Amino acid sequence: MVSESEESLSENEESKAIREPKTPKIPVWDLPDVPKGKLPPHIQLQRTRVFCTSDAPTHTENIQYSGAYASMGVDNSLRLEEFRNNFRVDVIKLSEDDMEFDMIGIDAAIANAFRRILISELPTMAIEKVFMANNTSVVQDEVLAHRLGLIPLKVDPRLFNYMSENDEPNEKNTIVFKLHVRCEKGSSRIKVKSNELKWLPNGSEFILSTEKATSDSTSKPKTYTSFNCSQESLPEFSNDPIAPKHDDIIIAKLGAGQEIELEAHAVKGMGKTHAKWSPVATAWYRMLPEVVLLQEIKGEKAEELVKKCPVNVFDIEDIGRGRKRATVAQPRSCTLCRECIRGDDWDKLVALRRVRDHFIFTIESTGALPPEVLFTEAVKILEDKCERVITELS
Amino acid sequence: MEHGSFQDPSQATFSVTDEDHTLANSLRFILNQDPRVTFCGYSIPHPADARVNIRVQTTGDVAGEVLKDSCQDLMLVCQHVRSTFDQAVMEFKNKEGLKSMNIRQ
């Protein structure tokens, strides 16, 4: 027994002696210090990037807590000074209706707030009430009214007030349009397009049914609106008549002998009540894709990589003597389809990530306001919300 | 509306009406970055009610004051975003204007 244990002991010692040079034993107090005031590179990467691995995105959550990295001597609290120095906006594309810009150095929480406000809390004008005088078309009244509501109007909503329940429709809160189209008997079918909507700057022309009994009085008969003056006389509309943004939206089709006569009243509203009041067709952002080649990819492998990508992110570079090397040419067009990291060990060659604080923001306006104005208005609304909370607290 | 205790002003829940994730999530972000805050979160008690509850717990400061400071911070952030954006748009328009002039020549 004794000899056996001795033998095994000596064997152990022997194996230890062999292993020792490979893993030297370092006392904990001799270990190099974790650098203070700086995050180790892998944690810094996790903090600033979202990883797109082959099965799922990882490290997607934002570390918001101010003391998250306190043990490493890193302050994660918000410094306005730092924010001001790092925040950047680059306009990529700007036209009458669309805009694309990069917003760099801001958290998703705030970028998302802007997006949400753009979609649902910026007011516009849209047709809300439709007075049908005659509709013999195949389109039912309620369907027709809905279609009219969705037509974007080219008018600045900031010039109007909201109409609350007890308000009389007047020149400051209502826009009236008239639509009267008839398809004569014997003629072929016609299309009713949005250019048939005629603006009535003096308000409704339909007389209230209760007025009929006293119609012989000399005063002006009361209509469905009570305008104090013509909207045309207001300086903001005199040069720029109110009309639908597009002339060629088909509202209905009329067969021979059919007729539509109606009056449509547009009021101010917000996208959260109904999408017809949303000033944007879409407003969205995506984080900047980052494609990194972890190793040099040469020769046939490089050709394969270029072929793998459906949006041509990669390109081939000649490094002399006919040798080829893959490069990342257009990381911005990457859709993160992960096709390039599919298959055997490709994920060890290519890394797909997203930059956490770089947003590619796109706004498509419906036409009431230009997109750059929409964004500044959205930011103003968030400011107003903060101000409201401050006043409610004090 | 504030729900807090009289003994301990350092923790309170604020019930804000007519608000949603838009404001609450931005405020939570700003509050969490404040070193005086030990805990902050928000909830929407019922999706049909336009109301959010924002919970703030601090290391000792009055919770309401910390929330107010955060609102102030968020406003400053917004103002900076707005001015930076306007400047970027103006620069872009100037650049594009010059480009279109070159085309006409």
Image (cartoon, coloured by chain):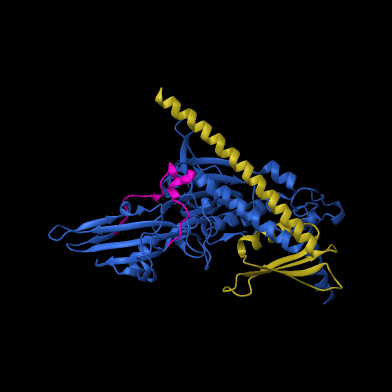
Q: Is residue A234 magenta?
A: yes
- The residue segment tinted magenta is A225-251
Quarter occupied by the C terminus of chain A: bottom right
The percent coordinates of residue A114 (x first, y second) are: 58, 54
* Quarter-of-image position of residue A144: bottom left
Residue sitting at the far bottom: A1
The percent coordinates of residue A388 (x first, y second) are: 68, 59
The percent coordinates of residue A330 (x first, y second) are: 49, 42
Q: Residue at x 70, y 46 (%)?
A: A83
Q: Is residue A222 above or below residue A229?
A: below
Residue A343 in view in this figure? no
Could you say which is closer to the camera, residue A147 or residue A327?
Answer: A147
Q: Is residue A193 magenta?
A: no
Residue A370 in view in this figure? yes
Q: Which chain is blue?
A: A
Q: Is residue B63 above or below residue A24?
A: below
Q: Is residue B101 above or below residue B34?
A: above
Could you say which is closer to the camera, residue A343 or residue A1?
Answer: A343
Quarter occupied by the N terminus of chain A: bottom right
Relative to residue A140, is residue A157 drawn left or right? Answer: right
